[in-house]
Amino acid sequence: MDFDPPAEHEILRDSVRRFFEEELPEPRIRELDRSRKIPRELWKRFAELGWMGLSVPEEFGGSSANVMTAAVLTEELAYRFPSLATDWLLVSMTARTLREHGSQGQKAELLPRLASGDFLMAFGMTEPSGGTDVLGLTTRAERDGDGWVVRGQKLFTSFADDADAILVLCRTDAVEGKRAGGLSLILTPRNQAGVEVRRLELMGMRAACTCEVFLDDARAPADAIVGQRGRGWYHLLSSLDEERILCAAMYVGITAAALDQALEYAKERTAFGRPIGSYQALQHPLADVATDLEQIRLLTEKAAWLQSNGRECAGEAAMAKLAATEAAIRATDRCMRVLAGHGLVEETPMERLFRDARLGPFSPISNEMVKNFLGERMGLPRSY
Ligand SMILES: Cc1cc2nc3c(=O)[nH]c(=O)nc-3n(C[C@H](O)[C@H](O)[C@H](O)COP(=O)(O)OP(=O)(O)OC[C@H]3O[C@@H](n4cnc5c(N)ncnc54)[C@H](O)[C@@H]3O)c2cc1C
């Protein structure tokens, strides 16, 4: 077993840190968080840095990196700016869906544009009726003349307003007794009369620009279906595993950032003539956070390693997501207490980390549902 990170991971970490120092310092991050927006130029810059095409195959203009590398990028982005990591992980997981299930024509046309930052694709799965019971979705698409007509509503679709297209999971066929059957993925162009997008004002992950999407006779061309008609849910499964792994990496980044900020503060701040970090009451919770961080990093790396090596990883991806998101909640709470009043001030990144961490336990899948899934995998009866 080798616990030394590969040299290319260290190089990637360094380049992300340099990017933030030189091009996206903390005051600018705060500005973007307040404006609830990731500007398009930032995605173009990501493309120049090779990050938009990280998981796009080389033949389509990307660098064919695996999930372990994508997890390193996600963690480093989340360390500074979790909203940016949220959107980037969606870029990566939808690129997987396209490269695994897109037609040759779709791959040749869209993957190079994705890698160059010219094409942004959002992912619309969740509906107002609930993200947990996702197979109960009611958005439908039917053939009409030379294309598809999509009708329904999506909720919590990140960066839908800025996207060029939304990969919409919808029902195209009725399959008796099998809710997972009959669903398809339709790449629906964003800029058209049938698509209305409303930005949501969320407490956390503000700049991820999460939206409500109304699909009112939205049109998509006949070849907009990704993969086989009626097999959309099954096509998504490996992308959803990737999403959980990258989500875990994101909360590793948040936990690491909270710990570093609390440690720095605990060393500098004094009370009763001593650094507050010299009090055991502060050291013990920080030791707990450090231990959590080590555990969730190992779980995440293992899940990423499994998927990168083509192994089954659904259980490990779910566990990594569960552990990392709960650890980030504990970490941001404990570390916020170390900063006390200063942690609540909007000028400190801790305040943003605290808000952003709140998303983890219920997205992209709720931790209750993760436990249902893990219970079933251990041979217990399905609980839902
Ligand atoms: C910032 C943000 C970005 C997002 N981005 C996207 C995106 O880009 N695309 C997308 O498709 N979705 C996105 N989502 C949606 C996200 O995946 C859902 O919020 C998530 O799946 C939970 O769904 P829900 O919020 O509707 O909660 P619900 O499904 O309504 O669940 C409410 C509660 O009930 C519990 N519950 C429900 N059923 C059970 C059961 N059987 N057993 C135990 N507990 C149960 C849940 O665990 C939860 O605690 C995003 C959400 C947010 C907030």
Image (tube, rainbow, N blue to C red):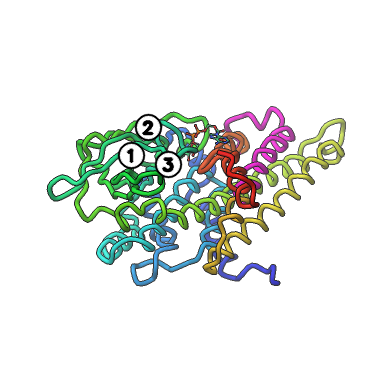
Examine the structure image and report whether residue 352 is included in the region drawn in magenta.
Answer: no
Local crowd at mark 1 within 10 Å, few (<14), some, or many (≥20)?
many
Whether tag 2 and tag 3 are in contact, CB under 8 A, the answer is: no
Mark 2: amino acid? Arg
Residue 106 is situated, as x and y percent measured from the top left of the image, at 27, 61
In this rendering, the label closer to the viewer, 1 or 3? 3
Q: How far across and how far down the image is residue 355, in percent?
A: 57, 34
Residue at the (55%, 48%) spot, across then down:
78
Cα distance between the residues tagged 2 and 1: 7 Å
Which comes sooner in the sequence, label 1 or label 3?
3
Cα distance between the residues tagged 2 and 3: 24 Å
Q: Is residue 12 visible?
A: yes
Gap between marks 1 and 3, in whole Å?
Answer: 24 Å
Residue 8 lies left or right of residue 238; in this view the side is right
- Which of the 4 quarters of the picture holds residue 289? top right
The disc labelled 1 sits on which kind of residue? Answer: Asp
Residue 340 highlighted magenta (yes or no)? yes
Amino acid type for the residue under numbered disc 3: Leu
Residue occupied by mark 2? 199
Q: Position of residue 323 (x, y in %)?
A: 66, 47
User: Pointers 2 and 1 in contact (CB under 8 A)?
Assistant: yes
Where does residue 158 sit, x and y in percent of width and height? 41, 41
Residue beneath disc 1: 161
Q: Main secondary structure of the magenta part?
A: helix
Tell me which residue sits at (66%, 48%) in the image: 256
Question: Mark 2 or mark 3: which comes first in sequence?
Answer: 3
Q: Quadrant of the N terminus?
A: bottom right
Which residues are the magenta region? 320-349
Q: Are marks 1 and 3 in contact (CB under 8 Å)?
A: no
